[in-house]
Amino acid sequence: MFSKILIANRGEIAVRIIRACHEMGIKSVAVYSEADCDALHVSLADESVCIGKAASKDSYLNQNAIISAALATGAQAIHPGYGFLSENAEFAALCEKYSIVFIGPSAEVISKMGDKDTARSIMAAAGVPVTKGTGILKDADEAKKAAKDIGYPVLIKATAGGGGRGIRLVEKEEDLEAAFSSASTEAEGAFANGDLYMEKYLYPVKHVEVQLVCDNAGNVVCVGERECSIQNRNQKLLEESPSTAVTPKLREKMYAAAIKAAKAVNYTSLGTVEFLLDTNSDFYFMEMNTRLQVEHPVTEMVTGVDLVKWQIRIAAGVALDFTADDVKVNGHAIECRINAMGGADNCVRLLHSPGGFGVRFDTALYQDYKVPPFYDSMIAKLIVHAKTREEAIRKMEAALCEIVILGVETNRDMQVSILEDKDFIKGEYYTDFCKKKFGGK
């Protein structure tokens, strides 16, 4: 097992990983930007190293600075968390070059699954269902020809995409050229890669993902599924497990497809296979996230499996000590992402965290902390667990109403509104839920 791990991230996920390290008897090293000198993860870690200025490109995306910090502190491994460098094949290869363990899959696997066009081809060859689509499109004219064959509406997507960027819905031909251009420009700016591909737009659909834990001995175990259809502008807002739309028979099929996906690339570490599920219970591969997911706590709550600890153990060469038969889903869990909405000075003047049986509040906030404006807007995650979905909804409403974060405007009221919606309560909602309810805002 490792004796020291560097956490190449910030915020609540850095805090989460540091706590797991401490519980495992592993020393932790925090890295931080100048804007994060007062951040909670810095004070919780055993050691900390400033790696650059506030901008992500100068700090949390500065690969050489992070490697230097690991070498200087004697860290044997680097945990990337999610976002930033967590799915960066170049960084994973750089870790290998300096004999530092990257806590995640290999650079080769990250590269294959990070390129959406390549991933679709691999999945199709492995027998995993994929939507009708194309390879990389050279220009808008080629896209127009492909769209006629596929049939409108279509989605134009960045092959190097993530986080909802580089995606455009095109419902008619006259809109395609502008959509192609704007998607390519956005993808180039976000990923330094403007390549696009196209796939059939399915509607209405649910977004359901399967959590995988894969060790170096070839063992692949599905650890439940998560319903992630509550999204605003392609960004997840609320997740739950299990999905109300997944029957035992469908679950068996989805798990089998997810296992095929992992075995097709000899996957190791944690991974998530994301599917689109239509109203006929047909599902299609969307992408594979080669990292720890933001929403991993709902899986932990219903299964009792500590995903972060297992991610670390697998990176250290430890084989799984449980099988699929050992994984039992108990009750229901819901996660609400608490996002800062801007305004005021974003200084936490008063903080009250909700509590109680089956309530978990993952955050890096503390009283008088000033939320930096340079990073992702998510400042906390509220997770609840109960015997039934109905009880979990009531518990989440109560917990949301208990949150007090004076000085920072949040999306708490929006989350309460979602929980009170009749379609959500019935479980009959799709990826367009927020667009219908909030007008896409």
Image (cartoon, helix red, strand yellow):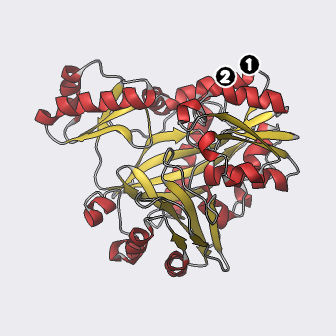
C-beta proximity under 8 Å, tags 2 and 1: yes
Q: Nearer the viewer, residue 354 or 38?
A: 38
Residue 332 appears in the rendering: no
Left or right of residue 42, residue 437 in this image: left
Type of amino acid under label 2: Ala
Residue 97's tag is 1
Horizontal and vertical percent position of residue 271: 61, 43
Q: Can you identify the residue that label 2 sits on?
A: 93
- Image point (54%, 74%), residue name: 404
Q: Quadrant of residue 291?
A: top right
Q: Nearer the viewer, residue 26 or 291?
A: 26
Horizontal and vertical percent position of residue 309: 76, 51
Residue 380 appears in the rendering: yes
Q: Nearer the viewer, residue 17 or 317?
A: 17
Above or below 134: residue 7? below
Left or right of residue 424, residue 226 in this image: right
- Image point (55%, 26%), residue name: 111
Above or below 216: residue 385? below
Where disc 1 sits, the SS reads helix
Horizontal and vertical percent position of residue 39: 66, 52
Q: Nearer the viewer, residue 96 or 315?
A: 96
